[in-house]
Amino acid sequence: MHSRLLFGQDWDVIVSTLDEVVPMQPIALLEIGCAEGYTSRSIMDELDRRHVEYTYYAIDPMLYRPLDVQHPRFHFIKGFSSDQPVLDAAPALVHWLFVDGCHCEICARRDITLYFPRVCPGGLALVHDTAPDTQGLDPQHYQGAQAYHDHEKAKVHGIQVLKALDAVPAGFTLTKAALPQERGGVQVYTRTA
């Protein structure tokens, strides 16, 4: 099984992290940057297959395409992850966090700063597109999102998630680094304190 957008090592890493948080159930999961929701849906299918008790939250401004998820455990929060109404609507405590929103350095750093503290002790925080070979790819032209990041820098430099990882707060331990040759790459942190 894989999601329509994530496959190979990225999907394998995500599934392995579910193994770690399932024993904490009922669990709360939060995805920042769900786009149409294909990854959300695939993760929920995996959790349903395991008969897990969970609530899945997803944040996205939905600038480009419609959400394609309907599930009784799915709670969609529309808006930019740094908007106050979104921050207020997002769960205060999660067991599993997947940061996959805007990939410019400013936004990735902001999402790490705002949402890592919501991960409970023993919980996991995943950051997508952290593989070294992915940095600088896919210049982003987030129409309508210019006020939320350095649009000109993002157009020139593309994906810059690795540069934002110095914002990971104390109390988190890197438990799985993205491999250098991966396209995409998921970096995993465990909250230890």
Image: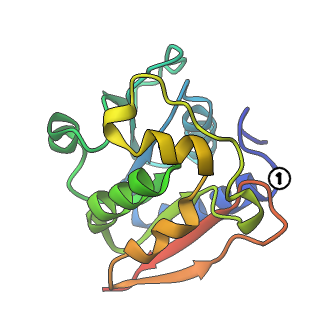
Can residue 74 be seen in the rendering of this structure?
A: no
Residue 81 falls in image quadrant = top left
* Quadrant of the snapshot with the C terminus: bottom left
Q: Position of residue 94 (x, y in %)?
A: 32, 58
* Quadrant of the snapshot with the N terminus: top right
Q: Position of residue 137 (x, y in %)?
A: 72, 49
- The secondary element bearing badge 1 is classed as helix
Q: Is residue 24 above or below residue 151?
A: below
Q: Is residue 147 above or below residue 184?
A: above
| Mark 1 residue crowding within 10 angstroms, few (<14) / some (14–19) / many (20+) | few
Closest to the observer: 14 or 143? 143
Q: Position of residue 84 (x, y in %)?
A: 15, 40
Seen in the image, is 4 located left or right of residue 78? right
Three-letter amino acid code at the position of disc 1: Gly
Q: Position of residue 33 (x, y in %)?
A: 47, 39
Visual colour scheme: rainbow
Question: At 45% across and 45% down in the image, what residue appears?
Answer: 31
Closest to the observer: 77 or 164? 164
Question: At 49% across and 49% down in the image, what residue appears?
Answer: 52
Closest to the observer: 139 or 132? 139
Question: At 36% across and 55% down in the image, what residue appears?
Answer: 111
Q: Is residue 158 above or below residue 64?
A: below
Q: How many marks?
A: 1
Question: At 62% across and 30% down in the image, what residue appears?
Answer: 38
Seen in the image, is 62 located left or right of residue 37? left
Closest to the observer: 96 or 44? 96
Circle 1 is placed at which residue position? 8
Residue 122 falls in image quadrant = bottom left
Residue 131 falls in image quadrant = bottom right
Can residue 21 be seen in the rendering of this structure?
A: yes
